[in-house]
Amino acid sequence: MSKKPEILAVKSVARSRLFHIQQLDLRFNNGTEVTFERLQSNAAGSVLMIPVDGDELVLIKEYAAGTEQYELGFPKGSIDAGEEPLDAARRELREEIGMASDNIRQLRRVILSPAYFNRPTWIMLATSLKVAPLPGDEPEEIEHIRWPLARMWELLERKDFADGLNQLALYLLGDVLKEESC
């Protein structure tokens, strides 16, 4: 395995309440010096839950400022300081879809773009759902959409199901369902 590049300097470029952009000056082992930028998250990470209620997925539709439109996807949210991913998943399920689960399992930990971003997301499967709402922190009420599990692959054809993490979660769910049917 290669030796990691030497960090020559780290400079703060910009900071917001959510992110910190840093410039890194690096020297690689072959002597090449380059400058990279990275986006550091101020949060501990995030969770994305795949809620399965019987033979249906429970999706949410909420406004996405990045695309300036309403997007369909799975419930998700930030992990609070000192909170474990599983606890964040339990809380976010209750806040975003008003349901709780005693059967949540981690499917994968991913980082969207490790070359530029340090924030991990834990993708979790939640089953055995029951009604247990908590007040959320969303600016408007989140629309809930029940989607037949038998038609889950049709989500990939929808323009409003564009988030890559949601698509990855769907494929992970497909793997779980395939394993369980064997």
Image (tube, rainbow, N blue to C red):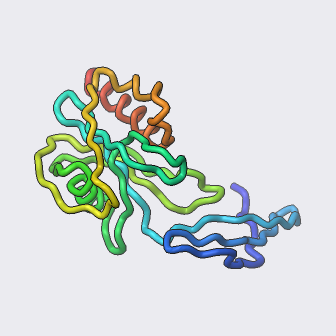
Vertical placement of residue 103 versus 28, above or below = above
110, 37: nearer the viewer: 37
- Residue at 27% over, 53% down: 141
- In the shown orientation, is residue 17 left or right of residue 76? right
Residue at the spot 81% in from the left edge and 69% down from the top edge: 27
Residue 70: percent from the left, percent from the top?
Answer: 43, 43
Where does the image place residue 170, in percent across and percent down from the top left? 39, 34
The picture quadrant where one finds residue 114 is bottom right
Q: Residue at x 18, y 46 (%)?
A: 103
The picture quadrant where one finds residue 148 is top left
Instruction: Please indicate whether residue 172 sits to the left or right of residue 17 in the image.
Output: left
Identify the image quadrant of the N terminus.
Answer: bottom right
Q: Residue farthest to the left? A: 131
Residue found at the far right of this picture = 31
Q: Is residue 126 left or right of residue 26?
A: left
Q: Is the residue 39 above or below the residue 12 in the image? A: above
